[in-house]
Amino acid sequence: METRYNLKSPAVKRLMKEAAELKDPTDHYHAQPLEDNLFEWHFTVRGPPDSDFDGGVYHGRIVLPPEYPMKPPSIILLTANGRFEVGKKICLSISGHHPETWQPSWSIRTALLAIIGFMPTKGEGAIGSLDYTPEERRALAKKSQDFCCEGCGSAMKDVLLPLKSGSDSSQADQEAKELARQISFKAEVNSSGKTISESDLNHSFSLTDLQDDIPTTFQGATASTSYGVQNSSAASFHQPTQPVAKNTSMSPRQRRAQQQSQRRLSTSPDVIQGHQPRDNHTDHAYS
């Protein structure tokens, strides 16, 4: 199998490492990739004790994306169990239905323990969930031991180690329960406890919002005047003509000529109508 994949790929390296770690079955779970596909695994988990699934052995598929472990796997149960639909991707906080809660530090072993831990919980209408009666689930648990997978050839009667009553078995069950509790809490926080970050606030206003808040100077002003900056002609409307400073170096004739020029300017029609000179080339239209 190693020669078929790019060994430099993070996903390939990670999956080969996990396959080596999970090579030997335990009394609670086992998982391995298919011989011809590193990105599809078949798994088997034992039903949690003291539950409707006690005594059951359940088989399924884990399909991993090329971006694993940055993206979560999809999980499909193949054994009838009364909690998850058969042949359908189930909705768990560790599955592809919830990429927002997935953590790259989680692994296939994490997924196996989570499946065990979630089995006794209520489906609450989640995708791929079922709410069979306790009697139906116990009947399916007993029947599950006769299941044999056509895809990988695993037989439920002997795929896992015999269940032992030692501390290792109880520790694995406790770990599964705690993991399911932690993942459920994380999913609830992500779905209902979202906060708006400072960066979200900084980018939450559009250009239209800004234009609505800032008045324009004139009805026909262009976009350059829409942000509270008046154009030069508008500013001149409110400003009286500034007197030209006297130049003491002028001759009497020059000063008289300057005064006459100022008087002509003050009586011109353009100045009387607001000190706004006519401009045949202006881009603004005023009413």
Image (cartoon, grey):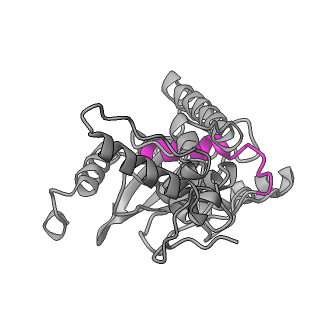
Question: Residue at the location (43% across, 54% down)?
Answer: 261
- The residue lying furthest to the front in this view is 252
Left or right of 77 in this view: 54:
right
Is residue 11 depicted above or below 244 in this figure? below
Left or right of 249 in this view: 59:
right
Nearer to the camera, 87 or 124: 124
Please tell me how many numbered marks the rendered image carries. 0
Question: Residue at the location (41% across, 44% down)?
Answer: 107
Q: Principal SS element in the magenta part?
A: helix
Question: Residue at the location (39% across, 46% down)?
Answer: 256
Is residue 212 depicted above or below 50 in this figure? below
Nearer to the camera, 148 or 99: 99
Query: Is residue 278 visible to the viewer in this orientation of the structure?
Result: yes
Residue 277 horizontal/vertical position (percent)? 52, 64
Question: Residue at the location (25% across, 57% down)?
Answer: 12
Nearer to the camera, 62 or 238: 238
Left or right of 251 in this view: 258:
right
Position of the N terminus, as image quadrant, is bottom left
Residue 68, picture quadrant: bottom left
Nearer to the camera, 154 or 116: 116
Residue 20 horizontal/vertical position (percent)? 27, 47
Residue 81 horizontal/vertical position (percent)? 70, 59
Query: Is residue 156 visible to the viewer in this orientation of the structure?
Result: no
Residue 72 horizontal/vertical position (percent)? 46, 54
Does the magenta portion include 138?
no
Residue stretch rendered in magenta on the structure: 108-125
Residue 41, picture quadrant: bottom left
